[in-house]
Image (cartoon, coloured by chain):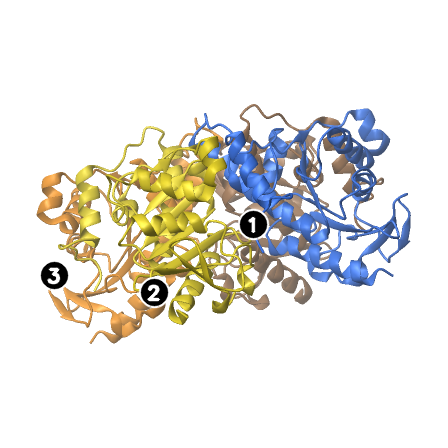
Chain colours: A blue, B yellow, C brown, D orange
Amino acid sequence: MLEQLKKEVYEANMLLPKHGLVTFTWGNVSGLDKETGLFVIKPSGVDYDQLTPGDMVVMDLDGNKVEGNYNPSSDTATHLELYKAFPDIRGIVHTHSEWATSWAQAGRGIPCYGTTHADYMYGEIPCVRNLTKEEIDEAYEKNTGVLIVEYFKDKDYISMPAVLCKNHGPFTWGKDAYDAVHNAVVLEEVAKMAARCELINPQALPAPQELQDKHYNRKHGADAYYGQ
Amino acid sequence: MLEQLKKEVYEANMLLPKHGLVTFTWGNVSGLDKETGLFVIKPSGVDYDQLTPGDMVVMDLDGNKVEGNYNPSSDTATHLELYKAFPDIRGIVHTHSEWATSWAQAGRGIPCYGTTHADYMYGEIPCVRNLTKEEIDEAYEKNTGVLIVEYFKDKDYISMPAVLCKNHGPFTWGKDAYDAVHNAVVLEEVAKMAARCELINPQALPAPQELQDKHYNRKHGADAYYGQ
Amino acid sequence: MLEQLKKEVYEANMLLPKHGLVTFTWGNVSGLDKETGLFVIKPSGVDYDQLTPGDMVVMDLDGNKVEGNYNPSSDTATHLELYKAFPDIRGIVHTHSEWATSWAQAGRGIPCYGTTHADYMYGEIPCVRNLTKEEIDEAYEKNTGVLIVEYFKDKDYISMPAVLCKNHGPFTWGKDAYDAVHNAVVLEEVAKMAARCELINPQALPAPQELQDKHYNRKHGADAYYGQ
Amino acid sequence: MLEQLKKEVYEANMLLPKHGLVTFTWGNVSGLDKETGLFVIKPSGVDYDQLTPGDMVVMDLDGNKVEGNYNPSSDTATHLELYKAFPDIRGIVHTHSEWATSWAQAGRGIPCYGTTHADYMYGEIPCVRNLTKEEIDEAYEKNTGVLIVEYFKDKDYISMPAVLCKNHGPFTWGKDAYDAVHNAVVLEEVAKMAARCELINPQALPAPQELQDKHYNRKHGADAYYGQ
């Protein structure tokens, strides 16, 4: 079932090592089939060089495994919460990519220092708080998703397709699994250049709002004119 | 038309990922045909691994597309302003290369800390100011070029073939498209070593003027003796 | 003799350059055969691209060479002390991997800033003191092992399979040679992200204890649920 | 003539891009034939991927070209001074490798923070002063060599086979061209880890003298026991 989606999710997962975003098995991509309400996700702890499309696990949005020989990613419950709350996304990525994770460990959002950032993500990339001990004990992965959803409840998850979880790492999303990986790559580049920007000039300020607006709108929305 | 120039511009564009200067489609190279006053530029938002020489877009210096199946790079208007104002250049490169962009985001010019820099670029690599909201709203890409030209109006664009645009990224130029790419690579190396130099010694000073002069003149001008 | 173990130790040694953990011959892996009490280790100063499984050296736990055409690694006496004191390990790695060594040179343990660290190593990765001149003169490599064992005498070497030796570099261990290499890779990633975390936020604090506990126990022990 | 030496010097030059020590043509290796008093060096400004053994240039120690189709490296006069003053070396390397050059630009010698450094180089790697305007005008490349020789006149150039030239970059040497490249690689690794060491702990101190002595003497001299 969902053979095409499994193939896409498999390919999107394989893009993570290709782009240098994962060490060992430290990442996972999922993709949602909107019609059936099922999503496909990488199995937990399986090496990337041994993955096949058929290894992908099919889940429903209640968290039940529908098909698959393996256990799904241990972060499945986080993906599930995001799919339920963000109706316009069909792909999610989690990694421990080194620069984004360094910001997450530092507990800081990433200011928008330039047009590379503004081309894809509108404003500061947020870093959400630690879960409490109670939230961890109750349902760690689920509550990670709940916390992200809570943060975005009065914000636009389309123009900010990324979040950092404090002392943990990033999640990104997109219109499909490939797009979510694309955003994970962008996040990593932006995180790297923001850190170096601050080393070069500790008093650096975010890009002027009009420049951020110009670049974001050059690529997104009704007046976009970038690309073909 | 301009088949040879299209091939050169295509090859020069392909050197950007080879040298690690671009992620995804974040860069563009153009080349000018001095006789016809036409220039050739990468199409907007097309993946590097799908580019062909025939995809290059031919433009005139009034900004009209003369030939091509694709829209030209969204930065075409910037290239055009530079070609009009700098009569001795025939190639231009824009990238978001990581170290040069980090300096641009930091809003600082790059001091000449050593001979690697002085071999190619004479003095501090400038960082031009942000455009105003009015300049952005009127014509963002064109005014980016106008601002660069304004900066260089009483300066030598030959001995300083690079500029940083604040909160954005670098442009470089040269005697042809390959040479402009060469300068983009040099800029990135120089930007990286200057940032690290300042971390190693926050009180570091630029190289003595006589050393900068020696190295620049060893490679450029009537008394050059580097190379064959 | 011990052909299978030689092959494993050979393969584990070859993983060091593959993962970018060694320059030239700056690393060594050993593996222990519990039944015979013999261990197999890389020969000293032999290039990785010339190694073969048959070049591995077989040692006993009294430090006698049992088989092999080459001298064993100059760090053999350190490995030996660890095998004698840590009954549940069967693989040891020493490298000069760049980030872990930078922390060792800085003389600091690596705080647990995030879940990447907590997934594998419980608490701060320790940095043990310099040996005294007397200890160096008496038996440098042996006393390096003695010092590590002394540090761990009231601690759990299973949940902390890594140590930094001040002004020197890291040792890691594991349930076999592959596992010890796995931990060496983790250590390097963790060391890199911890250094960058502190640059991004000099006031960064370790991850909350409950988050460290959650991640460590998600992957280890009776209640682990990561993987298959 | 000197076909074997040309081949060695060619191969040693090709190791520079292999080890990531050069961009474009920014480096050169030479090798000395002790019997004839001739040395072989890379031609100036020729791309590494177009070099052949036959392109190497043969020079005598008076600075005359003895054989070759190309001009020798522009740094030839520096090599020559070192060969004349350091009787026990037969290979020299100059690069603009990024970390060593960053230290040179910072105008600082590299403290011996650990055993990686002490295994190869005894004590702080020196950074010599800028040449004066008079020295530059008189004979830049020759006086670069004279300055290095002056620095080492009461020091041991064998146990410290490397130097940084302020605002310029490193030179290394060795018992042949390969060994000089080996030292250039070591220098770059040591420079990188020393810079990171200081970021991790700005109060870091050099390794204790007895540890430096132990490691240097473990690999060099009558009591060496590293390797085969």
Compared with residue D84, is residue B167 higher up or lower down, i.e. above or below? Answer: above
Count of numbered circles in the view: 3
Question: What's the residue at 58%, 43% (across, down)?
Answer: A188
Q: Chain of mark 3?
A: D
Quadrant location of the N terminus of chain D in the rendered image? bottom left
Q: N-terminal of the two: label 3 or label 2?
A: 2
Looking at the rendered structure, whether the residues under marks 2 and 1 are on a common chain is answered as no
Quadrant location of the C terminus of chain D in the rendered image? bottom left
Q: Which of the labelled discs sits on residue A136, or is there none?
A: none
Looking at the rendered structure, whether the residues under marks 3 and 2 are on a common chain is answered as yes
Which label lies toward us, 3 or 2?
2
Question: What's the residue at 56%, 67% (across, down)?
Answer: C52
Give the left or right position of residue D5, taking residue A105 as reference.
left
User: For the residue labelled by badge 3, is the local secondary structure a helix, a strand or a loop?
Assistant: loop
Give the residue at mark 2: D48
Q: Amino acid at mark 2?
A: Tyr
Compared with residue D192, is residue B72 higher up or lower down, i.e. above or below? Answer: below
Q: Are marks 1 and 3 in contact (CB under 8 Å)?
A: no
Q: Amino acid at mark 3?
A: Gly
Q: Position of residue A121 (x, y in %)?
A: 61, 39
Q: Chain of mark 1?
A: A
Give the residue at mark 1: A226
Give the residue at mark 3: D63
Tell which of A22 and C102 is nearer to you.
Answer: A22
User: For the residue labelled by badge 2, is the local secondary structure a helix, a strand or a loop?
Assistant: helix
Tell which of A141 and A221 is nearer to you.
Answer: A221
